[in-house]
Image (tube, rainbow, N blue to C red):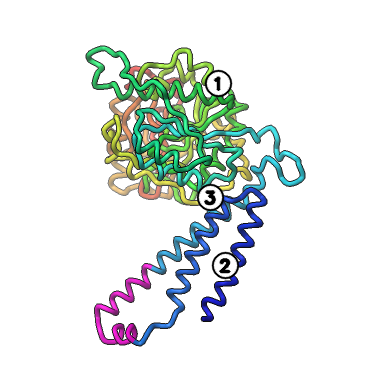
Amino acid sequence: MLFLHTHFFHFISLQRCWAMLRKRGSAIFCGAFLFVAWNAILVLYFWGRPLSSREERELAGEKDGADLAEGVIHMAEAFEAELEKQRKILLQIQGHRSQWDPDNGNGVIRGAPSQVAIPILVIACNRVSIKRCLDKLIEYRPSPELYPIIVSQDCGHAETAQVIDSYGSQVHHLKQPDLSDVSVKPEHKKFQGYYKISRHYHWALNQVFNSLSHSAVVIVEDDLEVAPDFFEYFRSVYPLLKSDPSLWCVSAWNDNGRDGYVDPGKPDLLYRTDFFPGLGWMLLKELWEELEPKWPGAFWDDWMRQPEQRRERSCIRPEISRTLTFGRKGVSLGQFYDKYLRYIKLNSEFVPFSKLDLSYLNEDKYKEIFDKQVYSVPLVRYEDIQQGQLKGAGPFRVQYSSKEGFKVLAKNFGVMEDLKSGVPRTGYRGVVSFLLKGKRIYLAPPPGWSKYDPTWS
């Protein structure tokens, strides 16, 4: 009775919270808060209620009962820990919401130049598991006005369309109208899927920039899960992308971001990279106007990595990825998934990037600092690392001077070894940075690096 009396007042308080937050336009957050609070109450109830005499007899006299009780306690403890983690994340997101609100209550736009709407374009086809992607986007989204979710669906898959439509006004559902096969050379028939994906991207980006008149967009695919600070990350780096002509994208992805290869103590660390990462990335309308007239018929991501498109520009990418792919099946037939992608570490902490000084990412400053960091550290051999002969905490530099040398070293280290037009994945000025057994390693070309060799592919 005491439980019901006490938690009746908890329920009334939650109702008041709901009413108050609805007035402030925070229904989504409050819904998540109510979910966390209600489950916490259930945990407290099952922990706190007295055992019945039958339960006491069973627990006292039967080993199986004791094992069951112990298992329930462990499960409850794990559940409570997860609830506490989710509660902290949601409170962090809500705490930063005032910085993103178009209207701060006084009719004044906060930081007006940066408060442009940045839509999230979800590229979809026939995965009903898009629900996992959309659920996280909606859970972590701080403002529907500043981050409209646009789902562009190809393939005409009815079950997937039903999942998307179940979100109602929380998402804008577009349907790519041309579902016909693309006319290709006979030897390219097996690549039909890649041609359709490229056509879909072309159509969807035209819808976002031309029909809906947005000036920037973040693209994710239907098999990506986002981190709690996904929106904070892109919002905070947007001014850099807008102002620095040496940048052409911001990506949420680290190709070598597997657990053990990234520094868990530095979730706020960002890099410049010459490699186009994709897998959750932001571009501006100006870039689309440049690329759209020559958009390729297929393999659009590798096309983006060619020198003619990259034009010596860089992207921003994080130390710890802000997206995670859960889609092994697709047109690529799981290429790289089992060996690399499934082990990518997804950031779990909320980093307040909007409060950090990100000016170190500007080209001139970054290049100078980066070169000093890389070429001032001890030069070691792979054998020294393998045999545990490194002295000190690092960082350390391992040098390569040929395509074959890079591939052998990358393979031995366990980082991705493929090159696109001479650029290694995550590379900046030829340097690939990663953690190995807790020590920072720079896999780098000799000092005086000047340019990539596009024949290294």
> Helix or strand or loop: what does disc 2 sit on?
helix
Residue located beneath label 3 in the image: 350
Mark closest to the chain's N terminus, 3 or 2? 2
* Residue at screen point 51% across, 42% down: 230
Q: Main secondary structure of the magenta part?
A: helix
- Marks 1 and 3 sit apart, C-alpha to C-alpha, by 33 Å
Residue 255 in sight in this render: no
Which disc is residue 392 wearing? none
Residue range in magenta is 54-75
Residue 74 located within the stretch drawn in magenta: yes
Q: Position of residue 452 (x, y in %)?
A: 41, 21
- Marks 3 and 2 sit apart, C-alpha to C-alpha, by 29 Å
From the image, state whether disc 3 or disc 2 is nearer to you. Answer: 2
Pointers 3 and 2 in contact (C-beta within 8 Å): no
* Residue at screen point 40% across, 33% down: 124
Mark closest to the chain's N terminus, 2 or 1? 2
Residue 41 located within the stretch drawn in magenta: no
10 Å crowding of disc 1: few (<14), some (14-19), many (20+): few
Residue located beneath label 2 in the image: 11
> Helix or strand or loop: what does disc 1 sit on?
helix
Residue type pointed to by label 1: Asn
From the image, state whether disc 1 or disc 3 is nearer to you. Answer: 1
Residue type pointed to by label 2: Phe
Query: From the viewer's perspective, is 29 left or right of 302?
Result: right
Which disc is residue 210 wearing? 1
Q: Position of residue 20 (x, y in %)?
A: 66, 57
Mark closest to the chain's N terminus, 1 or 3? 1
- Marks 2 and 1 sit apart, C-alpha to C-alpha, by 47 Å
Q: Position of residue 133 (x, y in %)?
A: 42, 42
